[in-house]
Image: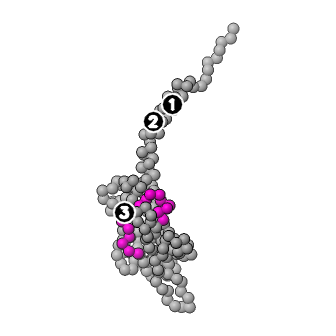
C-alpha cells in the first residue's frame, strides 16, 4: 500500500492573506513615494535653473559675448531662456544680448545650442517668486550688469516644498530652502 505524498503549494486562504498584507504595506508606503516624487520634481527644476544660469555665465566669458536670461510666464506655466549677443564681424564690437522668448523653439541660443528650462519638463512645479527683471551677464567678468542679486522661488506640486535660486551680484547661483518650509537634503536654509 502506498502513502500519498504531502502537497506542496499555497492554499487559497494563505494566498489571500499574503495579498492583504501586501496591499496594507503598499497603502502605507504610498504617501512616502508621493512626497519623494514631489521633492525630487521641484529639486530637479531648481537644479536645471542653476545649471542654465551657470552655463550662460560661462559661455559669456568663454565666447566674449554678453548673455541675457529672460523668464516668461507665472504659476505652473513658465520658462527661462538664455540668449547670447550676435558674434562680431569685421572687427566691430559685439552688441548687447537681447532677451529671448523661451516659448519660441528657435529662440534662446547660446554657443549654438538652445538653452531653455521649461515648466513642461517639471509637471505642476510652479513659480512662487519670479525674477524681478531679466539678467544680463557681462562678457568680460561674467558679472551681472547692473550689479544686484536676484531670487527665483519654485514650489512643489502640492506646495509643501519651496526651493529658492539665488543669483548673486557676480552671477553665481545657489540653492536654498526658504524659512518656514521643510528642509531638503544637502540644501542650506536661506
Label 1, label 2: how many angstroms apart (C-alpha)?
10 Å
The residue depicted at 40 percent of the width and 63 percent of the height is 75
Picture layout, residue 14 above or below residue 86: above
Q: Position of residue 131 (x, y in %)?
A: 38, 70
Picture layout, residue 23 above or below residue 186: above
Local crowd size for mark 2, using a 10 Å CA cut-off: few (<14), some (14–19), many (≥20): few
The label nearer to you, 3 versus 1, is 3
| Residue numbers of the magenta segment | 118-134
Picture layout, residue 183 above or below residue 18: below
Q: Position of residue 108 (x, y in %)?
A: 51, 74
CB atoms of marks 1 and 2 within 8 Å: no
CB atoms of marks 3 and 1 within 8 Å: no
Q: Which mark is residue 128?
A: 3
Label 3, label 2: how many angstroms apart (C-alpha)?
36 Å
Please tell me which residue lies in front, 134 or 148.
134
Q: Quadrant of the C terminus?
A: bottom left
Residue identifier under label 1: 18
CB atoms of marks 3 and 2 within 8 Å: no
* Element carrying mark 1: helix
The residue depicted at 52 percent of the width and 25 percent of the height is 13
Q: Which mark is residue 85?
A: none
Picture layout, residue 11 above or below residue 158: above
Amino acid at each position: 500500500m502506498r502513502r500519498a505524498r504531502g502537497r506542496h503549494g499555497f492554499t487559497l486562504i494563505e494566498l489571500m492573506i499574503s495579498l492583504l498584507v501586501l496591499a496594507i504595506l503598499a497603502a502605507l508606503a504610498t504617501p512616502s513615494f508621493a512626497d519623494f516624487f514631489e521633492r525630487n520634481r521641484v529639486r530637479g527644476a531648481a537644479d536645471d535653473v542653476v545649471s542654465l544660469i551657470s552655463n550662460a555665465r560661462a559661455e559669456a566669458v568663454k565666447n566674449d559675448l554678453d548673455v541675457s536670461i529672460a523668464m516668461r510666464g507665472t504659476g505652473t506655466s513658465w520658462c527661462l531662456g538664455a540668449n547670447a549677443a550676435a558674434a562680431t564681424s569685421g572687427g566691430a564690437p559685439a552688441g548687447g544680448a537681447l532677451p529671448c522668448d523661451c516659448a519660441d523653439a528657435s529662440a534662446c541660443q547660446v554657443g549654438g545650442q538652445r538653452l531653455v528650462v521649461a515648466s513642461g519638463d517639471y509637471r505642476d512645479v510652479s513659480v512662487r517668486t519670479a525674477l524681478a527683471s531679466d539678467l544680463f551677464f557681462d562678457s568680460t567678468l561674467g558679472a551681472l550688469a547692473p550689479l544686484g542679486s536676484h531670487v527665483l522661488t519654485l514650489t512643489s506640486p502640492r506646495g509643501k516644498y519651496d526651493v529658492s535660486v539665488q543669483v548673486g551680484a557676480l552671477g553665481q547661483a545657489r540653492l536654498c530652502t526658504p524659512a518656514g518650509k521643510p528642509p531638503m537634503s544637502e540644501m542650506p536654509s536661506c
